[in-house]
Image (cartoon, rainbow, N blue to C red):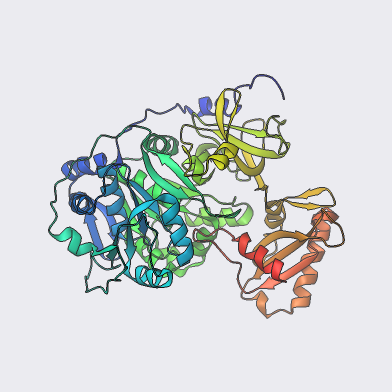
Amino acid sequence: MSGQLQPGPWLAVHEELGVQPPEVDDRPPGTFVELYAQTIADSSALRYFERDICYRELNELSNRLANGLVTLGIGRNDVVGLHMPNIPQYVIALVALSKLGATGSGVSPLLAPAEVAHQLEDASVKVLISLDSLAKPTLDALGGLPDCVTAVIVTGADDLRQPSDLELPAPDSVVCRAFLELTANASSEFRQVDLPPDHVLLIQYTGGTTGKPKGAMLTLRAIMYHMAIFNIYRPWEVAAETVASAFPLFHVAGVSLMLIALTAGARSLLIPDGRDLDHFCQQMVDFPPTRLAAVPTLYQMIADHPLSAEIDFSHLKSAQTGAAPITGEDRKRIERMLKGTVLSDGYGMTEAGPTLVVNPPQRCKPESVGMPLPTVDVRIVDVETGTRELPYGEAGEIIASSPCLMKGYRNRPDESANSLREWHGKTWMYTGDVGTMDEEGYIYLKDRAKDMIIVSGFKVFSVEVEDKLSALDFIACSALIGSPDLNRPGSEVVNLYVELTPEAKQLGSDQVRAEILEFCRVEMAPYKVPKIVHLVDAIPLTAVGKVDKKVLRAQAAQA
């Protein structure tokens, strides 16, 4: 395809479904919490173990923290790091920062101390709010914090349930305060300041799979616009929603869903440890969700859990998933558990605020990740130049233009210019993902460009092979990576990592490898057949449940 871009084919499906671009409310999240503190004051905003925090209390706690942060010198555009799991204090901080006109930056509890220091310095974090069990070991290991950090606020996971005395670290030249002590005597009054649409509300760091993590600057307009278009197929009803998600709040998926919930006056179930399936499922038994969001692996783990049969999914309005398509029998089994609710796949990235593509529940194609949301434009272009649009069905790089795109990477002008490019009069995010588009505008994700394996000039899409292997009932999870072929420069060796089901682990490894390779030889072209099959106890996962191929590449390199 060449010349002027033609209108996207998905627009015809939008018209068929009656989907229109939404009106966007640019008011900051703090404004909505203030409103609900008046209109639905006693409605639960957060459920944390046995503790409910209503909108009145959330507003007051956020105001106290905002006033406390002012005493520590935080004002407009200052950056505050949030170094916590999913606990109420994280949400309180998000609202407080909105009210102040400051900027929040999630700091993963999984980061090593040196990685924490890099992110604090890169984002110019002025105040760090950290969990007590994270703060002391991090500070002890670092021996000090970057010069930009002037204060640390330390909180306990149970501060709002059963507060106890905290052992505060004593870093040199940095003020250290306990969360409860800072907020106890602070005023419970604080009004949301006016903010322009281009205010950077969040600096969200990418996973760093291709180098050091980069801070995507997400503006107020981008975040509020994302809320409006994300809800387009299943609009939310104010004060009538219960949201169940184990996405960590430091991840863009978790924080965006939390902000959507707050602007809808919803109750969010706070799950501090997504691996604690007993707790997550019990919370859903006690508070049946109307909205559920999880990666495919977590949906399957819930379906396998004994408590899943006790969860009342009859009120469920939407079940979002992402990271990888769920197909075949796995999808049917999960939708049976969800009492027929159609899984709605999504595709996006931190830099896109995050969602670009959603599978309409009313018109779902399970093999795809969906079609562009209203006002989002997605194209498939050649990987080499990124300037030639490809025909339907041909694999290339996915690029997207959206009102929700990041402002850029903080302090990375060169990388910002490489990712955000002008083409046909629009700014496009070059995603680095490889996919195809069909004649109706549905996107089929093939691979990350860096995950695509080249074997003697042939392209092997790892997702395609992994999806086919899911047909083998003795495979619990699989992951494909490439490693350099020392005998053929420029070519790679296909490595398959396999986690077996508990029953299959009793079988002999030679027998299992033979069955896998026989299946692959029948089902795949010869160049796609794995050369090395690694049987592992568990496939490594990232904090949000995606397969962590960075870890597997490191293992392959060591081997």
Q: Is residue 292 visible?
A: no
505 shown above or below 483: below
The residue lying toward the viewer, choosing from 497 and 234, is 497
164 shown above or below 257: below
Query: How far across and how far down the image is residue 359, in percent?
Result: 54, 40
| Res 167 → quadrant | bottom left
Q: Is 351 displayed left or right of 192 in the figure?
A: right
Query: How far across and how far down the image is residue 235, in percent?
Result: 38, 37
| Res 274 → quadrant | bottom left
26 shown above or below 319: above
Q: Is 331 displayed left or right of 162 in the figure?
A: right
Q: Is 214 displayed left or right of 85 in the figure?
A: right
The residue lying toward the viewer, choosing from 150 and 55, is 150
Query: How far across and how far down the image is residue 342, in percent?
Result: 51, 46
* Residue sitting at x 85%, y 52%: 456
* Residue sitting at x 75%, y 73%: 512
Q: Is 216 displayed left or right of 440 in the figure?
A: left
Query: How far across and how far down the image is residue 366, in percent?
Result: 60, 45
Question: Number of labelled discs?
Answer: 0
The C terminus, quarter of image? bottom right
* Residue sitting at x 61%, y 65%: 551
| Res 217 → quadrant | top left
The N terminus, quarter of image? top right
Q: Is residue 180 visible?
A: yes
The residue lying toward the viewer, choosing from 532 and 511, is 532
Residue sitting farthest toward the top: 4
